[in-house]
Image (cartoon, rainbow, N blue to C red):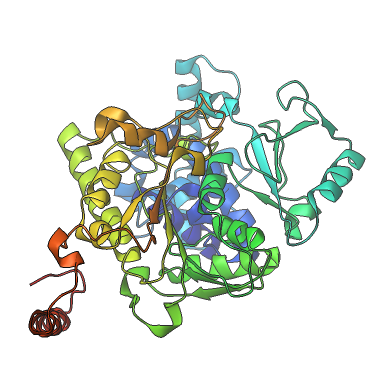
Amino acid sequence: MNFYFEAAKTLDRLDAKQGSIKSVLATLPEKDRRRTAALVIETLKYRPVLTDIIAATKLLKEERKKITSLNLALVLVHDLLLSGGIQAGDGPVKQAILRHKTRMRSEFQKIKIKRGVKTDTDLAQSGDERAARIPRYVRVNTLNWPTEEAIKSLISQGFSVSSPFESAKGFAIDEHIPDLLSFSPQTTFHEDPLYKSGKIILQDKASCFPAIVLAPPSTKDAVVIDATSAPGNKTSHLSALMQNNGKLYAFERDKKRFSTLTTMLSRAGCKNVLPLNVDFLTVDPLDSKYEKVTHILLDPSCSGSGIVNRLDHLLEIEIEDESDQEERLRRLAGFQLMMVKHAMRFPGVQRIVYSTCSIHATENEHVVRDVLNSDEAKSGNFSLATSNEVLPQWHRRGLPDELDDPAQASSLVRCLPGEDATNGFFVSCFVRDLSPTRKRKDVPADEDHEVPDSRRKKKKKRRKTVKLATVNTGDRASRT
């Protein structure tokens, strides 16, 4: 029966919007993950029907002492009606369900007749039609073998290089992302030895953009940060681009997601990654261990409004009032802005990529706009990378009307779900101007000349006062 309790808890987490179906399932113990995931997904497919049956039979009211939640009832009733019976020993919870077996089966048949369907599968929720236009993307993990060898191996399994939509066994080499292959949307690899051994990684094309845009160095002295790492696809991509050289700090604050991260990195052969179960926002940018960090990847929590994959359409999310949705987006944007500004406080950072899987300007262009207007960006001489540095061959760019300077839209990358053969995505890149001739914006022109000793001493004293005040407030972003 513990299996059903675990499945019910997983549904509780999904209802609480603690992540996508894929990310929440990834945190389950590996030995039970496949079985629990199958029950959760199948229950979600039939949830509207099962909920109606539970309500009609008054199960929760009459068995409230044994069936403690709707989600527990859902997984048990699913197996009773759709999976050959409840797979657990006789006990008070199972008996509570079985007392209503005849009535529930009767209600199930009534629903089928009312909807005019002949089979049980006809009652399952249909998927988002846009998902059918997104290929199954596979990134070859070059840490474990070269792409050329991977292609030969796939061909030996009966695959051929052709359009993934013309043949179930066809695959194509991506034109924008190195080492990325696309297959028919129906192709599955979860049980394939190549996937289980870490030789291939299942990762949407748009999700590969951030690491490519960040372009981390592959030198032995390189130091890079992935600020929000789990489940680890982008982290392993960074590691591959770095060719396992240098040092890659991977932060993940959630314990369960951190466990998933470490498992994934081990399977992928990422030897230059230092996973840390730490909240990136609590890290001191002035800590000596991070003084050589030059590149930071930020893919923080977002609304997920661009995701239309084959699982998340199953979540029946209540339609929010427009004002409630805007407030939620504003809260997310405030957190996202905080993350980017914190990254800019690392003294050696030269390049920061900020990305989301959102289609909302509030989380995308507006955050970029607010970052560029921040003290951190101005004092650090940060600006947007040029379009030539940010996937120059990609056609879809930012929204000009959502920025202070419409010309900056060309520096931003967008993907629209269903239209670009990807999920919805957004990528931006901030770079620091290290030119020794560039003048600080907060320094008057006359102070560029030699300063008399008396003025130099006063300035030095004033800077010291500011530093002390900053330390006392505990906020490195504050100014007095």
Please give the name of the residue rendered at 53% of the width and 32% of the height, measured from the top-left corner: 394
User: Do we see residue 412 in this rendering?
Assistant: no
User: Do we see residue 107 in this rendering?
Assistant: yes
With respect to residue 229, does 12 lie above or below?
Answer: above
Relative to the observer, which residue lies in front, 189 or 233?
A: 233
Relative to the observer, which residue lies in front, 275 or 120?
A: 275
Q: Is residue 215 left or right of residue 303?
A: right
x, y percent for residue 189: 73, 45
x, y percent for residue 45: 51, 36
Please give the name of the residue rendered at 30% of the width and 43% of the height, measured from the top-left corner: 363
x, y percent for residue 437: 34, 60
Please give the name of the residue rendered at 56% of the width and 23% of the height, measured from the top-left corner: 122
The C terminus is located in which quarter?
Answer: bottom left
With respect to residue 372, does 310 lie above or below?
Answer: above
Q: Is residue 420 left or right of residue 73?
A: right
Relative to the observer, which residue lies in front, 25 or 249?
A: 249
x, y percent for residue 176: 62, 37
How many numbered badges does the structure rendering display? 0
Residue lying at the far right of the rendered structure: 156
Q: Is residue 14 left or right of residue 370?
A: right
With respect to residue 203, does 82 lie above or below?
Answer: above
Q: Which quadrant of the view contains residue 345? A: bottom left
Relative to the observer, which residue lies in front, 134 or 210?
A: 210
